[in-house]
Amino acid sequence: MKTIIEPFRIKSVEPIRQTTRAERERLVAAAGYNLFQLHASDILIDLLTDSGTSAMSTEQWAAMMRGDESYAGSESFYRLKQRVQAITGFKHVIPAHQGRAAERILFTVMCKPGCVVPNNTHFDTTRANIEFTGARAVDLPRPEAADTQLRIPFKGDLDVAALERLIESEGAGRIPLAMVTVTNNSGGGQPVSLANIQAIRDITARHGIPFYIDACRFAENAWFIRQDEAGYAGWSPLDIARKMFSLADGCTFSAKKDAFANIGGFLCTNDDRLAELEQNLLILTEGFPTYGGLAGRDLDAIAVGLEEVLDPDYLQYRIASTAYVGRHIADRGVPIVEPPGGHAIYIDAGRMLPHIPRGEFPAQSLAVELYRHAGVRSVEIGSVMFGANARHELLRLAIPRRVYTQSHMDYLVEAILEVNERKHELRGYAIAHEPPFLRHFTATFRPL
Ligand SMILES: *Cc1c(COP(=O)(O)O)cnc(C)c1O
């Protein structure tokens, strides 16, 4: 059989609400044309983010009932630790309430002013937490990633020649750690090859620089390696994940992505001295080291999710369903970041709407129209979010895990294609009001 189906059936349903175009026009105007300001109940299909929005399984809900809420020494923690170690092999597992809490602790312990931390592309919270310590976060994506239309595998790879040059110019002593983000979220959800991870390991080891993986989507990355990297077709996702982690000294992880949990994260390291410093900080702001700001039941949900996400049937469906949306719109003329990534499709709105200049936010215009037309919420990743630093004007459609069905995706494809037919009618926006930082969350807009 060629048809790839959702490898689950539905036991509990959550109704979603249809609205009329007239209602949505009124609602989005009242929200200042900022989709973050809408009530979730006014949205039909919510593709704002894949973070914390997964559907949990029956086994995860059952595990939550087993959660051990002991302050110290909770069994839930030991179950999580065992599962994380079985996948990553790391010695110390430090739970935290989400990925950014793990990042804050890691960088507080490892970075100081004047330091430099390279990554393929830093996620926004990663960059912010590095810069908060006074260190500098440097993105080193491979040069081909700049061309959104280029269709090559492993477009998320780090530019290892640029890493060598950075070490040469800064000196290894100024680089407390190097990172790689799998998959490369800010770079289009593109995967990183094992060959690239191995090359980063070799270079950093030669210079005595610790190497960490931002592992939020490690399982999706493992599937791309199995699918597209020579030599891994017969490997299980678990074995590929083990190999990825075996090349690193530690990792940060947001359980809101590939662990199907609604909250949670952790930090891992093999370094006893660092682990002690990290646990001391953890106690200060997150909690005792066997719960780290989470309930025992959350730790159990994450432990089960980490096992489920490595199921080959799930990963095949997940990557295929994202690619399905991407191919169906791109092959009918909607420019996307090619090739489709793991967790999201990014429409290149700058290319799709050349009549709207960057300063009038083409991706914001597309986001508003997709909501007005079909009740779909997406997010602008361009000049609204990054100001003058934006590299492209993208609209991200992030796909929550195990939440929407094939018919939801068909509806989405139809909606995008219909908006594309009338794209010449779309107009730009001006900012009416903006806060001093992170303006995309609360800014309001005025149609031009
Ligand atoms: C989501 C994410 C984070 C931060 O995790 P939170 O749980 O949202 O704090 C860090 N890195 C990447 C690549 C992410 O996608």
Image: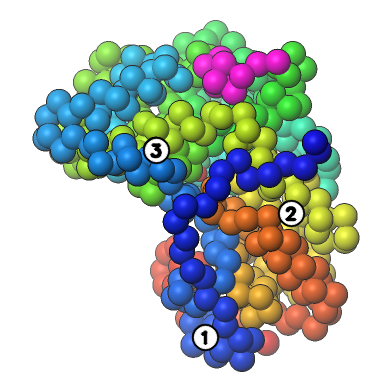
Residue most extreme to the left: 71
Q: Image height check: is 388 above or below 101? A: below
Neighbours of disc 3 within 10 Å: few (<14), some (14-19), many (20+)? few
- Give the spatial CA distance, label 2 vs label 1: 27 Å
Does residue 37 lie above or below 145 as drawn? below
Q: Is residue 126 above or below residue 349?
A: above
Please identify the dominant SS of the magenta region.
helix
Is the C terminus in the top left, top right, bottom left or bottom right quadrant?
bottom right
Q: Quadrant of the N terminus?
A: top right
Question: Is residue 227 or residue 432 the one in the foreground?
Answer: 227
What residue is disc 3 on? 59
Who's the residue at 59% across and 23% down the image? 237
Q: Amino acid at mark 3?
A: Glu
Q: Amino acid at mark 2?
A: Val
Marks 3 and 1, how far apart in space? 38 Å
Please give the name of the residue rendered at 46% of the width and 64% of the height, measured from the top-left corner: 14
Number of other residues with Cα within 10 Å of mark 2, as a class: few under 14, some 14 to 19, many 20 or more = many
Residue that lies at the very extreme toward the right in this rendered image? 332
Identity of the residue drawn at 41% across and 43% down: 58
Point 75% across, 80% down: residue: 426
Do the numbered discs 3 and 2 sit on residues whose CB atoms are within 8 Å?
A: no
Q: Which residue is mark 2?
A: 325
The tag earlier along the polypeptide, 2 or 1, is 1
